[in-house]
Image (tube, rainbow, N blue to C red):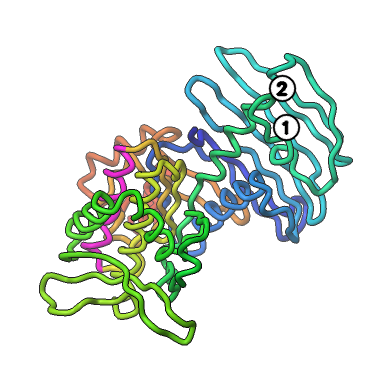
Amino acid sequence: MKIENFKYKNSKGTNKSWEIEKIEFNNINLIVGQNATGKTRVVGAIKELSELICGKATKGIARESFEISLKDEEKLYTYILEKSATAILKEKLEEVSEGKKRILLTREKNGEGKIYSLKDEKELIFGIQENQVAIDYKNDKIHHAFIAKIVDWAEKSIFYSFGTLLGRYNYCSSQESEEDYSLKDTNKVVKNYIRARENYKDELDNEIKNNLETIGYFIESIGVEKVKSTQGEVNILYVKEKDLKGKTYQFEMSQGMFRALSTIIQLNICILQNKGEFIVIDDIGEGLDYERSTKLINLIIQKTKKSNAQVILTTNDRFVMNNVDLKYWQVIKRECGNIKFCNMKNSKDIFEEFEYTGLSNFDFLSRKLYLGEEDAEYR
């Protein structure tokens, strides 16, 4: 299941309102824009919706509305959710298959609604609490398999913030390593690695080593080691670099190296276990030199092409932009509180004409050529 398009509104009717106009996604997407244009807001809104679908986030301080269309083979599901800080105001799920449209779920503010039962082949009436999300509450594989698919997509949506620590100082106790784990907790990289290694040791380690070499980090081995700390005995990650005699532990690595290592470990686990259907990496390459940033992005693109994953990357790094094909670009156009997007789908002529200018990809953004004409200050 993949996102076809997404829309969002926040605090409508107030002086703090802002809106993401419909953005159409590809399998691979690079959201680009200058600072404070809304890149993180966009992926944050999608993340919030995925958590609402899973029943993990119903609180907030603003009135919000979401609309997402997800494609599953030949079926297109459009889900609409409106909420306030304390209640779900409206829900609607619609299916389009072979040109035919039908309403699968409707729900109003009082919690009452109707949902289609695949088993009974008819609509059923239901009533739930005002703050409950119906699509999560009615997750039933027998009666409502269409909802189970959407919830599964949300559960397999993984969000990485590359500009954060990504678990650099998050160690794993022996007891914790035996507990269930979730790849959605991207700070638990040590725990996730230990658990995945139980089933994929050689395959996982070899893939991590090869991927690190691809971006310029040459290691002989990777593993975990038990050490004593103020937290008691814990497991920590290490790598053995080829040009060093000793091991390099996770807290000794450079910020950029550990971010790359953490991302590569968790991305490979997602792909091996088919648990990363939708992967978002915000501020990709932050803390890495431009050569490694570019290589990491190209690595991610190639790996996701071979999997069933859909990926969104965000950046404002000019070197990264210059080395990623424009066909993957989603250029943010912000007008006050409105966020619009320019891409190959809605501005094909502009993108194709730019290919003959001889300019760099970064010029396409910095000179605002995506608007169809060069910004006056560059003329």
> What span is in magenta?
289-306
Comparing 17 with 243, the one in front is 243
Q: Residue sitting at 34 percent across and 38 percent down?
A: 307
Q: Residue sitting at 69 percent across and 52 percent down?
A: 10
Comparing 301 with 326, the one in front is 301
- The disc at residue 92 is 1
Which three-letter amino acid code belongs to the residue tagged 1?
Lys
Asked if one can make out residue 370 in the rendered structure from this viewpoint, the answer is no
Res 371 quadrant in image: top left
Question: In this rendering, would 179 be left or right of 126?
Answer: left
Q: Check disc 2 and report the residue beneath it.
A: 103
- SS label for mark 2: strand
Q: Residue sitting at 57 percent across and 40 percent down?
A: 6
- The secondary structure making up most of the magenta span is helix
For label 2, count other residues whose C-alpha is less than 10 Å away and answer few (under 14), some (14-19) or many (20+). Answer: some
Image coordinates of residue 257 in percent, x first then y, are 28, 69
Question: Compared with residue 235, is residue 152 higher up or lower down, i.e. above or below?
Answer: above
Residue found at the far left of this picture: 243
Q: Is 292 one of the magenta-colored residues?
A: yes
Q: Residue sitting at 77 percent across and 56 percent down?
A: 14
- The disc at residue 136 is none
